[in-house]
Image (spheres, helix red, strand yellow):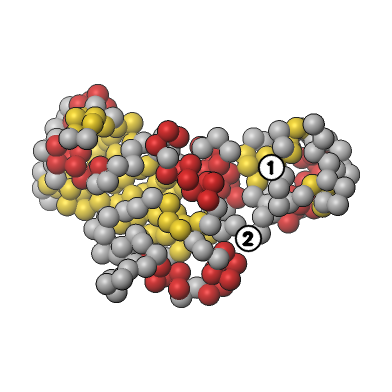
Amino acid sequence: MSTQSPDGVRLQKVLAQAGIASRRAAEELIAAGRVSVDGEIVREMGRRVDPDSAVVHVDGARVVLRDDLVYLALNKPRGMLSTMSDDRGRECVGDLIADRAELLNQAGRLFHVGRLDAETEGLLLLTNDGELGHRLMHPSFEVEKTYVAEVAGQVARDLGKRMRAGVELEDGPVEVHSFKLVDWSGGRSMVEIVLHEGRKHVVRRLMDEVGYPVLRLVRTGIGDVRLGEQRPGKLRPLNQSEVGALYRAVGL
């Protein structure tokens, strides 16, 4: 199937505009067979594509070409609602967006990908890419979420093994992908939990069930996107590598 779009933009220019590489370096990527358009490896320099419809991958990672799509990471503070508006006037994610007129002008309607309860802090993704957002939230794609929880007491040595084997909750079992003790001091343990679940309050309910109620909970990762040193209440755009990793995680 031809990927040529006679009225489109030269592929190397599209890659350069997307920030993948300079135009000359993009030509080298194409010549090396590292670029595909709509599933077909492209090696010709003259290939033209429609940035609004072409699906381009470099080294297997999806490249975002449309300039109207926005991908943001927010470090949601404790006490803030994961909603774009609240009829009771409580502080919510939408308040942060309302202060960023340039984002609204570029993106139109943004939405949050999944939720964090008000008392949970950490990474929340915002986008106007409906297809990606839907897949990230759908349980069938099993995108990993990483949490750091502070709990009272020192956790039992066999807790990780028990949790990886599965814990039965009232709405079904939960299997933890990985579990590790990060720190223990002052009578409190800090643990990292990675799971594919997206059920409501699942980490809190899980830790309650195994006897270690959560004192503080932070989501630190979604797929390959990490919170890092991002400060609470701050937004940042995802880079091409992060967006590509999210696309790859959901098969796009």
Q: Is residue 239 left or right of residue 201?
A: right
Where residue 66 sits in the image (x, y, percent)?
A: 67, 55
- For label 2, the SS is loop
Residue 227 in sight in this render: no
Residue drawn 52% across the image and 43% down it: 246
Residue highlighted by disc 2: 68
Q: Quadrant of residue 43?
A: top right
- For label 1, the SS is loop
Query: Which one is earlier in the sequence, the residue at label 2 or at label 1?
Result: 1
Q: Quadrant of residue 169?
A: top left
Q: Is residue 118 above or below residue 244?
A: below
How far is disc 2 from disc 1 in space, using C-alphas?
Answer: 15 Å
Image quadrant containing the N terminus: top right
Residue highlighted by disc 1: 55
**Amino acid type, mark 1:** Val
Q: Is residue 80 left or right of residue 12?
A: left
